[in-house]
Image (spheres, rainbow, N blue to C red):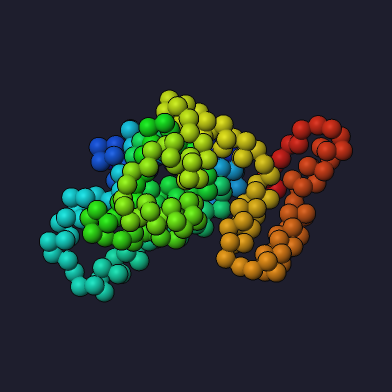
Amino acid sequence: MTEAVLYEQEGGVVTLTLNNPDTRNALSPDIIDALLLHVDRINADLSVGCVILTGAGKAFCSGGNVKKIGERAAGLPIPAEVRLGYRHGVQRLPMALYNLEAPLIAAVNGAAVGVGCDLAAMCDIRLAGASARFAESFLRVGLVSGDGGAWFLPRAVGLSKAYEMTFTGDFVDAAQALAIGLVSRVVDDERLLDEARALAGRIAAQPRHALRLSKRLIRDAQRVDLAASLEMAASMQALAQHTADHQEAMAALAEKRPPRFTGR
């Protein structure tokens, strides 16, 4: 049986690959379940310093399975059942990725459409291959983003551009995605994973406890006032200062040598 999401670890970097190229990696229950399991595994494993999310074949994620959406439209359950289906289905994914403790890089190869666009927006950093294309395309099929895109996309591109992408469903190419801040870098398609792995390696080389605390601090600071953010920072600093990696960093600085972090 083919794995829905491939899990590969090299050093401190894990690469998660959506593995259904025949559907251009359309999001499926199997892919969602596999991603949830991998998030739990990574959160419990301090050997992981950074994660890359990409797609097999020539697409990142083509969105939902249009055929199955059409089949559902022909015989919809009652609204309460649809609501529960989202809560216990695809909506588990944005919560899981939001709570992923290691930094997450999207290496967007090819199309990222609908939920695929939202999936990219759920990642901390986004790199795009030159052939990448994004579209917030739900209105094309008479739907809204049920997977958290209305929360993530404005935080990635700003409110005005998020409205424009949502209301038009227009495709945004890699160069446009760079201009609006949806991605931080565009590279040749054949170098996309190499660039993502190089960046992930630099991130994974940081002291693990402080790295994960830094991600949480930035994330949580987006929803609290300054006083609360400062209080969180003080508490996290107290934890970081008592790690062996902090002591090693200070010793390496004094001895003018590269630090040797152990994740403790």
Say which residue appears at 56% left-offset and 49% top-offset. Answer: 102
**Residue 206: which quarter of the image?**
top right
Quadrant, the N terminus: top left
Residue 2 seen anywhere in this rendered image of the structure: no
Q: Nearer the viewer, residue 83 or 34?
A: 83
Is 207 above or below relative to 129?
below
The vertical placement of 201 against 94, above or below, is: above
**As drawn, which residue projects farthest toward the left?**
74
Horizontal and vertical percent for residue 171? 33, 43
**Image location of residue 222, percent across then percent down:** 58, 61
The residue shown at (42%, 37%) is 174
Task: Give the quadrant of residue 24.
Answer: top left
| Residue 78 appears in the rendering | yes
Give the residue at x 77% y 47%.
246
Q: Nearer the viewer, residue 239 or 216?
A: 216
At x 87% / y 38%, what residue is drawn? 254
Q: How many marks?
A: 0
- In the drawing, does residue 98 fall left or right of residue 70? right
Report x, y in % for residue 108: 42, 38
Q: Is residue 175 left or right of residue 46?
A: left
Left or right, 124 with reference to 212: left
Percent across and percent down for residue 212 are 62, 51
Question: Is 226 above or below relative to 2?
Answer: below
